[in-house]
Amino acid sequence: MGQTTNTAAREVEHEVEIDAEATTIYGFIADVTRWPLMFPPTVHVEQRETGRGTERIQLWALANDEVKTWTSRRSLDPIGLRVEFRQEVSAPPVASMGGAWMIEPLALDRSRVRLLHDYRAVNDDPAALEWIEQAVDRNSRSELAALKQNAELAAARSDLLLDIDDTVQINGAAADVYDFLNEAQLWEGRLPHVARVTLTEDVAGIQVLEMDTRSKDGSSHTTRSVRVCLPHRKIVYKQTVLPALMTMHTGQWLLEPGADGVRATSRHTVAINEAGIGAVLGGDATVSDARDFVRTALSTNSSATLAHAKEYAERARR
């Protein structure tokens, strides 16, 4: 996997074979709303425009451990099993980038996926080109491995996925609720379940949040998240350092203003780490036990955060 030319404009190709039908694989690639759940580098995706066979998206993703955001135009071909993409607004050091996902049926339930990229660096800088090459290679390998895992397990283990929502009505302004959620560096003094917190925001609206969270039994665990903050409507995040019971955790704080104030929702999507259940909950514990444990833990902390945000915003209004 991975071949490049030696010119300033690079072309590279990665591929993987997957034991799944081609149409199933195409569905994973075509539906960008599922990418944060499936692809480790992807933090958040928003569809800016949709049309007949085309869409314009903004994507936030990790590249060599840095968070980058860019806007792309995609062309979707479900008959040809191909999705082409071209960045409209790239993030330095990328000057331009495009490519395609191509799916080739090998048998009824086996397919080859090829991921093509072409790119240039700003000012054709050799060091920048090397940085891009490393990021593309790292992310392509990670995405193809995740695509293979998800496509092959799609029908088998849906019980490992868990969605959790908690909502509260707040008689206050969305901006005040947003400020409370956005200013996570203050949570150690504001939230009783937060034992330690550090937050960095080198680029406005893109945060890296590391936090030690207390559990009911007195223990604590460390998580690290990348957060995309979109005033004053939502904050989305993806954990990059996870508790032992999870293999994936994405979340959102959603704010919906109305005549009576603002409706605030905490939303989690979690993949249970089946291999970690015994170590955390005991040898006899089941996936169902793990689901209940995770739901209780996340819902308890989210509800507490929403309650404190409600108090903060309603006090600000008074």
Image (tube, rainbow, N blue to C red):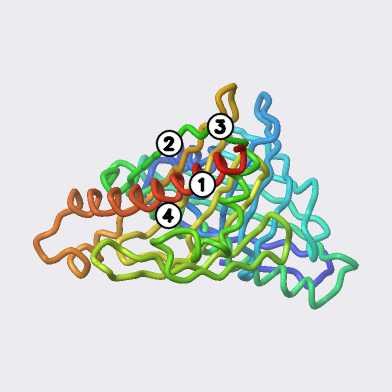
Alpha-carbon span between mark 2 and mark 4: 19 Å
Q: Position of residue 1 (x, y in %)?
A: 56, 66
Residue on which disc 2 sits: 167
Q: Amino acid at mark 1?
A: Ala
Q: Position of residue 194 (x, y in %)?
A: 43, 64
Q: Are marks 2 and 3 in contact (CB under 8 Å)?
A: no
Q: Earlier in the sequence, mark 3 or mark 1?
A: 3
Q: Residue furthest left?
A: 284
**Disc 2 versus disc 1: nearer the observer:** 1
Q: Residue at x 50, y 40 (%)?
A: 26
Residue on which disc 4 sits: 249
Q: Earlier in the sequence, mark 2 or mark 3?
A: 2
Q: Amino acid at mark 4?
A: His
Q: Earlier in the sequence, mark 4 or mark 1?
A: 4
**Disc 2 versus disc 4: nearer the observer:** 2
Q: Is residue 295 left or right of residue 21?
A: left
Residue on which disc 1 sits: 309
Q: Are marks 2 and 4 in contact (CB under 8 Å)?
A: no
Alpha-carbon span between mark 3 and mark 1: 11 Å
* Residue 32 showing in the rendered view: no
Q: Are marks 2 and 1 in contact (CB under 8 Å)?
A: no
Circle number at residue 317: none
Q: Secondary structure at mark 1?
A: helix
For the residue pair 233 and 14, the one nearer the viewer reads as 233
Q: Amino acid at mark 3?
A: Val
In the picture shown, does residue 26 fall above or below 206? above
Q: Residue at x 56, y 59 (%)?
A: 184
Residue on which disc 3 sits: 262
